[in-house]
């Protein structure tokens, strides 16, 4: 029987963690602070983490540890080198949130395009009842059909977004940050062309040396004044102070962010303090987190554990 420690179960919401009991004793924590890690993983055979950082300093105290399960796709919170050198297997889960991230992308785009917060408030505030007119054209909005959607990061999520965009009658182009991605279904363009041609730009790329700070003031200045930016990738891809400046200077029409440079977001984040915040849709890193996606994720974690103890290579993170 194994000891399984869940370090930050609250990040996964309401799931049935009892499925882990088939492997042994389950010890659950909503959250774990850095100074609590050593004591909590001591004696564990299996550790589940989403965002809790596991480094050599705390892992070296976990003498019984056999398996670390990253309950996400990204695993930069785990010292993979130390784990490998000490025969600790590491697994992650990919592909579980493709549909829900694409859905959230369109939810934010449609909110911005159709000015939904403004019109919803107009009715709920009682202003519509007082208006004496059957409609309100106070905030012009436009159709998606015929627009150009530029995608940064044409992986599984980017391709799903592209397919949905096509159903709206949108022209799709993309930019490969690595220069290696080639997809004959869509037109590949360079970065400047993507910025200048797109009515909507959505980011679905990983954070690396090619993408960090990619969307800065210079890039935003090249976009159409009627365009919107959506970041569903990683926060540091967009320079937030530059975006706030661009929004307030009306260089672009709007932006939607589900990820931020620092999470949770700081109260003095320039995007939060933007004067034209009606041009922004900000959500707290939830694009991945539909009920269905979280259940798929947890099912894959359980399957990774089963595979590990059956001597199979499944969901394994390698150097």
Image (tube, helix red, strand yellow):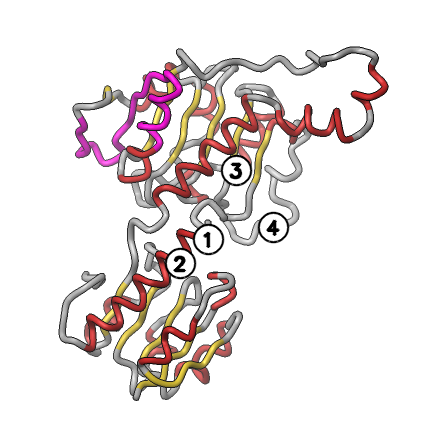
First-in-chain label (4 vs 2) = 4
Q: Is residue 21 above or below residue 186?
A: below
Q: CA distance from mark 1 to mark 4?
A: 27 Å
Identified at 35% across, 31% down, the residue is 161
**Residue bounds of the magenta highlight:** 161-183
Query: Percent position (x, y) of residue 86?
Result: 21, 78
In the picture of the structure, the residue carrying the numbered disc 3 is 240
For label 4, the residue is 266
Instruction: Determine whether label 1 and label 3 are within 8 Å by CB.
Output: no
The residue that label 2 is drawn on is 295
**Residue placed at 19% from the left, 33% from the top?**
181
The Cα–Cα distance between marks 1 and 3, rounded to whole angstroms, is 29 Å
First reached walking from the N terminus: tag 4 or tag 3: 3
Sequence order check, earlier mark of 1 and 3:
3
Indicate the quadrant where residue 237 lies.
top left
In the figure, 125 relative to 307: above or below? Answer: above
Whether 181 is among the magenta residues is yes
């Amino acid at each position: 029987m194994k000891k399984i420690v869940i370090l930050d179960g609250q990040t996964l919401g309401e799931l049935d963690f009892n499925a882990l009991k088939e492997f042994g004793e389950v010890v659950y924590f909503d959250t774990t602070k850095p100074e609590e890690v050593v004591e909590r993983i001591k004696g564990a055979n299996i550790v589940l983490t989403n965002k809790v950082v596991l480094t050599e300093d705390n892992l070296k105290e976990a003498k019984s540890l056999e398996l670390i399960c990253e309950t996400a796709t990204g695993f930069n919170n785990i010292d993979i080198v130390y784990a490998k050198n000490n025969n600790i297997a590491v697994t992650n889960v990919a592909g579980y949130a493709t549909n829900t991230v694409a859905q959230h992308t369109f939810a934010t785009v449609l909110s911005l395009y159709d000015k939904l917060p403004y019109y919803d408030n107009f009715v709920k505030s009682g202003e519509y009842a007082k208006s004496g007119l059957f409609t309100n054209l106070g905030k012009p909005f436009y159709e998606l059909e015929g627009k150009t959607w530029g995608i940064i990061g044409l992986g599984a999520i980017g391709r799903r977004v592209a397919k949905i965009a096509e159903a709206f009658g949108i022209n799709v182009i993309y930019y490969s940050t690595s220069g290696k991605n080639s997809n004959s279904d869509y037109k590949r363009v360079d970065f400047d062309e993507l910025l200048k041609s797109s009515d909507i730009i959505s980011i679905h790329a990983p954070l690396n040396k090619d993408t960090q700070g990619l969307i800065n003031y210079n890039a935003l200045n090249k976009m159409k004044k009627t365009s919107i930016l959506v970041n569903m990738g990683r926060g540091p891809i967009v320079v937030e102070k530059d975006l706030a400046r661009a929004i307030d200077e009306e260089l672009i029409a709007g932006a939607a962010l589900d990820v931020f440079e620092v999470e949770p977001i700081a109260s003095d984040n320039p995007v939060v303090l933007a004067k034209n915040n009606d041009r922004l849709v900000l959500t707290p890193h939830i694009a991945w987190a539909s009920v269905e996606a979280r259940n798929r994720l947890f099912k894959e974690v359980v399957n990774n554990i089963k595979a590990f103890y059956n001597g199979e290579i499944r969901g394994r993170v390698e150097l």
